[in-house]
Amino acid sequence: MDALYRDYILEHYKNPRNHGELEPHDLAFHDHNPLCGDELGVHVRVEDGKVAELRFHGQGCAISQAAASITSEELIGMPLDEVAKLDADWVIEQLGIEISPTRRKCALLMQKVMRGATTGDPSWPE
Amino acid sequence: MAVAERPLVDVATDFPVLAREFGGRRVAYLDSAATSQRPRQVVEAMDLFQRHSYAPIHRGVYELARESTDAFESARDRIAEFVGWEPACSIFTRNATEAINLVAFSWGRRNVGEGDEVLITEMEHHSNIVPWQVLCEETGATLRYLEVSEGFELSLDELDAVLGEGRVKLAAFAHVSNVLGTINPVAEIVRRVRAAGAVSLVDGSQGVPQLPVDLREIDADFYAWTGHKALGPTVGLLHGRRELLEAMPPFLTGGHMISRVEREQSTFRELPYKFEAGTSAATEAVGLAAAVEYLDELGMESVRAHERELTAYALERLPEVEGISLYGPVDPDRRGGVVPFSIDGMHPHDVAELCDRDAICVRAGHHCAQPLMRALGVGATARASFGVYNSRDEVDRLVDALGRAREVFGL
């Protein structure tokens, strides 16, 4: 089996969870990876200060799409202030694969966008 | 057609990087449109200059400084001769981007104003888009784009129609597209632009490395290119028409470009020094002279024939990969050595990552041409591009690697 393109990564890439748009939504954010032009947007519905529903959309590689899909499942139900605090290590842990420096931003784009949606801060997660 | 003095098949051994292995496989470098590898002749020329002749250029009165100045100016002469232009009107810049910015700032700010138009094309590299966007924003001029046709070419009829409206002050376009490979009829475009009373700038970054280029024949007002795609180091060139360059104010100012500096104002030197503020990249200039010497020895007709042949072979073999889409003109006579492609069900990043497992270097992304990507309706593509050192065998390896990549993705 491939060390990077594991079955579950490809499965999430081909059948992403929580993919699409959400109307109406309370929070929205859209951003891109300037290196490759990949784009990712999120729509979030908030209830009691928590992520009640979430949908992501855009286009990207298997790593960025799988990262969005896998983390989306964890993010639903999470308080917004916790979402904002999630760092790069958390994302990579969720992915469960080694990420080379050249693919790091692919993996982190979803969390960048989620941080943007919840705090307005569009910086890359450290 | 001129015959190469050395068979091109032996050329790869001149490039030390190409002997590297990754995972036990010799590297197949298919990314020359981004930057080309450098032959040892270039590395050695730079090394010799630094070991033997290095000193300030155009400054010292001592023998060593005369030697370094000679090496630098001889390099300019050699490079200017290679493309057929006057050395005094051949300006060293940091890269092609800076050469284009020089024109946008120095010529553009004086000659473009509200109600004027700057005409570019959808197939431009960002370096030939953004300087014109900024110029138009600052001056109130309008930026217009010539479309890329379904055959991935420009339409001369559309060019005539836009020029006919009489507002274009400058037209800037690529000699060869860095994504599609399209070889534009630059001499013909220049002729039409001039007939319409406008100034032309050709981005020759992908032209000089792979085509015989005679600037007298193209006769553009400005022609910009860079050494690092032409087997040399990163140093740019701007070739310009003398009347225009003489009338233009300096771009960057400071040392070397002045004739006399008073407390309140200064006078500037003659061409080309007026546009070469500060200490020039002399070692890089010497390296680029060695690179064009190397290309001349191979013969640019042979270089072109080699890259045309490889491109034709790639266009023949790549369709064997299931789900592949190719972009760019189908006729290898009308395109340079670059083949962009995408594979259904796989993102270009993943394609490039999996090619890397076989030590094959291909580019993935927007290739610094986002407006073109949008016009093509894709977010990104993978891209294989060729240089003098590539072989048919490497095209075969690419085709095999793409087949294996599809298997990894369960396609």
Image (spheres, helix red, strand yellow):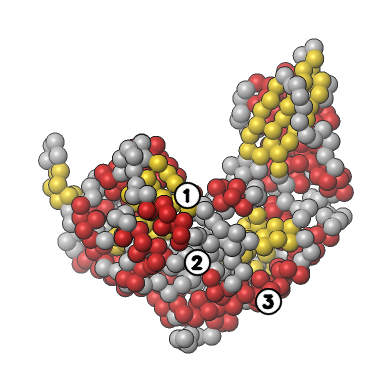
Q: Nearer the viewer, mark 3 or mark 1?
A: 1
B208 left or right of B36? left
Location of the C terminus of chain A by quadrant is top right
Tell me the subunit letter for badge 3. Answer: B
* Residue at image location 54% in from the left, 74% down from the top: B333
Residue B294: x, y in percent? 43, 76
Q: Tell me the SS state at disc 3.
A: helix
Task: Establish whether labels 3 and 1 are both on one chain.
Answer: yes
Residue B346 screen position, x and y as percent:
76, 53
Badge 1: residue crowd in 10 Å (few <14, some 14–19, many ≥20): some
Q: Amino acid at mark 3?
A: Asp
Q: Tag 1, which chain?
A: B
Mark found first going from the N terminus, 1 or 2: 1
Pick the residue in front: B81 or B158: B158
Count of all numbered marks drawn on residues in the image = 3
Spatial CA span between label 1 and label 2: 17 Å
Instruction: Check disc 2: other Cα within 10 Å, few if <14, some if 14-19, many if 20+.
Output: many
Residue at the image point whose x is 71% and y is 44% from the top: A60
Circle number at residue B145? 1
Element under disc 2: loop
Q: CA distance from mark 2 to mark 3?
A: 25 Å
User: What residue is shown with label 3?
Assistant: B393
- Residue B52 seen from this side: no
* Mark closer to the chain start, 2 or 3: 2
Would you place residue B308 above or below residue B1 in this image? above
What residue is pinned by disc 2? B183
